Amino acid sequence: MAMGVERATRRMQGRNSMSALLVSLLLLAAAAVVSSRATYTGSSSTAGATVTATAAPKKRAGKKQQVPALVVFGDSIVDPGNNNAISTIVKANFAPYGHDFGADHRPTGRFCNGRIPTDFIASRLGLKQLLPAYLAPNLSRHDLLTGVSFASGGTGYDPLTAQLASVISMTDQLRMFDEYKAKVRAAGGDAALSEILARGVFAVCAGSDDVANTYFTMRARSSYSHASYASLIVAHATAFLDGLLAAGARRVAVISMPPIGCVPSQRTLSGGMGRGCSPGHNEIAELVNAGMGTAVESLKAKHPGARVMLMDIYGYLVDMMVRPDAYGFRESTLGCCGTGMMEVAVLCNGVTSAVCGDVEEYLFWDSYHPTEKAYRILVDFVYDNYLKDLIA
């Protein structure tokens, strides 16, 4: 880890101010197109980069599928390509994204060098190898009946976050879910829909962009203290989860906030010359996680019969960052794309950004998102410590 910090410090001379300017321009460009953003209006036929879901792992004859479907909401951590189909600058459907995705190494809209957490979860649940984007063209009947992702990179629980980035808000994702239910009913009947609602896994992952982008980079909630902004996030997250439960979901997995102040871009922007973790970012994340713990208990009391579980990944990710060698990584403070300090989305591209020599040695793919290898390790932790209990 010390090696990574030294390398970063040497490269920061003359680049840090330019990197900050580039990320600000990226976010301001996104804000500038708010008036023309593609707010979801009920149509899912928009063309985009296709992600073809592979066949599900074979089930034993006569054995009922324990989980019929995986349905996902959230941000870029779990977006398999929905942003391909909307008008936003927050995309990942170009090289070097997809550097290790499949035999053809193609970009799909996943903000990663390969597969993302929901792909690994769908595989562990025995559903399929890849979880498709809901807005991907030509979804099959099997895709609908085994689950999709509504997630949109750049969104957050705070409604302002999606507006600034011109992406699909959490509220709009919930509206898309209503449309999805109608499609499931048409494809498999009332029984199929009832089975998905009762026994499917509904995963939610958001909040990081609220803190990193809306609060700190854009300063769009400058009147809020750390504590009051954390309360705002929790309030909107609780409202979303309440709506999801009211829509019929009965097994809901809520991913906690990560130590967002320790991702490479936030180290560069707020960690000083030594690029340490940003304490302000992590303070809000910890406050949100504490508030969500209370909110989850309240939601379970309000919706008897529903299982709602907060899956705490904060401490595990901190350990991966502090002791990367214990998880098979060499570098945990820089991304593999470009300098590793600021490149994400359009800043991580095939023209200006070289890829590191050995992706397997890096915890982060770009300056914000982990590598496929890191996601696989994280999903194993989540599945063994939380998901197994949720679906038992």
Image (spheres, rainbow, N blue to C red):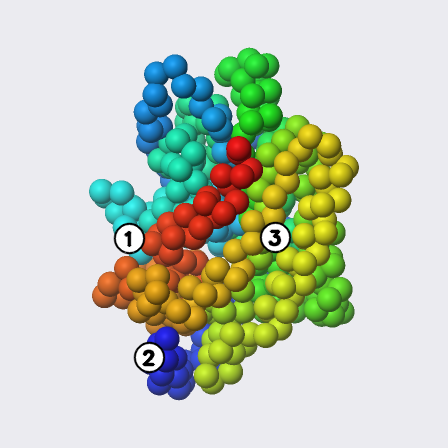
Across and down, in percent, residue 387 comes to: 51, 41
Which residue is located at x 43 percent, y 34 percent? 125
Inter-mark Cα distance, 1 to 2? 25 Å
Q: Which residue is mark 1?
A: 99
Q: Nearer the viewer, residue 149 or 49?
A: 149
Q: Crowding near pointer 3: few (<14 within 10 Å), some, many (20+)?
A: many
Name the residue nearer the viewer: 234 or 93: 234
Q: Which residue is mark 3?
A: 156
Give the total number of marks visible in the rendering.
3
| For residue 244, side relative to residue 375 (left or right) | right
CA gap, disc 2 and disc 3: 34 Å
Q: Are marks 1 and 2 in contact (CB under 8 Å)?
A: no
Q: Amino acid at mark 1?
A: His
Left of 359 or right of it: where is 128? right
Residue behind mark 2: 3
Q: Amino acid at mark 3?
A: Gly
Q: Is residue 278 above or below residue 361?
A: below
**Is residue 30 something one can see in this rendering?**
no
The picture quadrant where one finds residue 216 is bottom right
Q: Are marks 1 and 3 in contact (CB under 8 Å)?
A: no
Q: Compare marks 1 and 2 and give the one earlier in the sequence.
A: 2
Q: Identify the residue shown where x is 47% and y is 26%.
A: 66
Residue 233 x, y percent position in the rendering:
69, 56
